[in-house]
Amino acid sequence: MKSGTEYAKRIKKLFTRLKKEYGTPPKRDPTDPVDQLLFGILHRGTTTARAEKGLASLLGAMVDRNELRVSTPSELVELLGPGFQQATEKARALTQALNDVFARYHEIDLEDLKTKGKRDARKILEELDGVDPSTAAGIMLFSLDGHAVPVDENMLAVLREEELVHPDADVAEVQAFLERNVSASNAQAFTVLLRRYSEERAKKSGRSKPSRRTRKASSSKAKKKTADKRKTSSRASTQTRKTASKQTSRGKSASPRSPKKKAAASRKTTKTSSKRPSRRKTSASKSR
């Protein structure tokens, strides 16, 4: 990352400030890797509280995780409830990730990762369908006691706004930069504090409510569809009128003749028919 030394100093100052403001959080007990995977996906673009509530709703409605795996995205969206951010996208990611886990291990379990080296475990996680870099890092940090700093959308936004990272750096680059400058012993505390701070900032700025923007986008899409339907209907009705007009004009051109024209035509036919026999008579008299 460009100007990495300067950004590293700012990150250390931020960590010190957050510890003074919130206190140093205690180290947590390891979470279940699969549950952490589900939480990581649900946590995208929303708060920790909403992600935890969504996860509880899903697990509470299922017999086991395998039932969650075979559920349809629409069923999961319904369980997450109205207004859950990016619900459809997250539901698809959940089923993709669980199906990939099942395909690899023939069960919904990631305990095998604890027997592998940290690099190998992280590589496996990052290769899973539906799993983003932040979710993989979260599993490494909170489930496998690895050195990782998961960065979600809110955290990245705050880091950019306060010029703590390069503005063009993406999530993977920011995570790698933070992991180089935040020690393994501080990684969990730093993540918890930065997540809390960023969520509070997002709430104040309204960034934690993307569902409004989603509704606006859906509304504009619906309006566009309605307008397109109206245009199509208008074109169809115009075409119908044109067709009807053509058929009417054809009908007029093929309309029956007036009585005067009929009489004139009848007289003409009579004259023609009366002349023809005389010609035959003339030709017959000549032959005699």
Image (cartoon, rainbow, N blue to C red):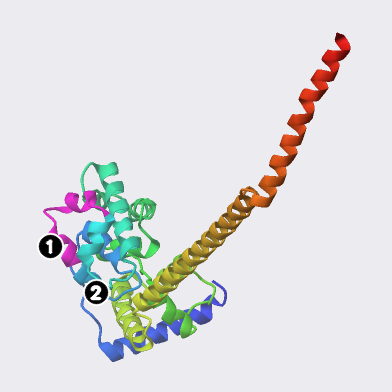
Give the number of the disc on residue 60: 1
Residue drawn at x 11%, y 53% is: 63
Position in image of residue 187 (x %, y %): 32, 72
Residue 159 in magenta? no
Position in image of residue 244 (x %, y %): 56, 56
Q: Is residue 267 above or below residue 280?
A: below
Q: Amino acid at mark 1?
A: Gly
> The N terminus is located in which quarter?
bottom right
Position in image of residue 235 (x %, y %): 55, 62
| Magenta part of the chain | 55-72
Q: Amino acid at mark 2?
A: Arg
Q: Is residue 129 above or below residue 166?
A: above
Nearer to me, 170 or 247: 247
Number of other residues with Cα within 10 Å of mark 2, as a class: few under 14, some 14 to 19, many 20 or more: some
Q: Is residue 141 visible?
A: no
Number of other residues with Cα within 10 Å of mark 1, as a class: few under 14, some 14 to 19, many 20 or more: few
Dot 1: what SS?
A: helix
Q: Is residue 272 left or right of residue 58?
A: right
Q: Is residue 202 left or right of residue 264?
A: left
Residue drawn at x 35%, y 56% is: 130
Nearer to me, 261 or 208: 261
Dot 2: what SS?
A: helix
Which residue matches tag 2?
50
Nearer to me, 38 or 251: 251
Quarter where residue 216 is shown: bottom left
> The C terminus is located in which quarter?
top right
Q: For the residues marked 2 and 1, what is the alpha-carbon distance in whole angstroms?
A: 15 Å
Q: Is residue 270 left or right of residue 142?
A: right
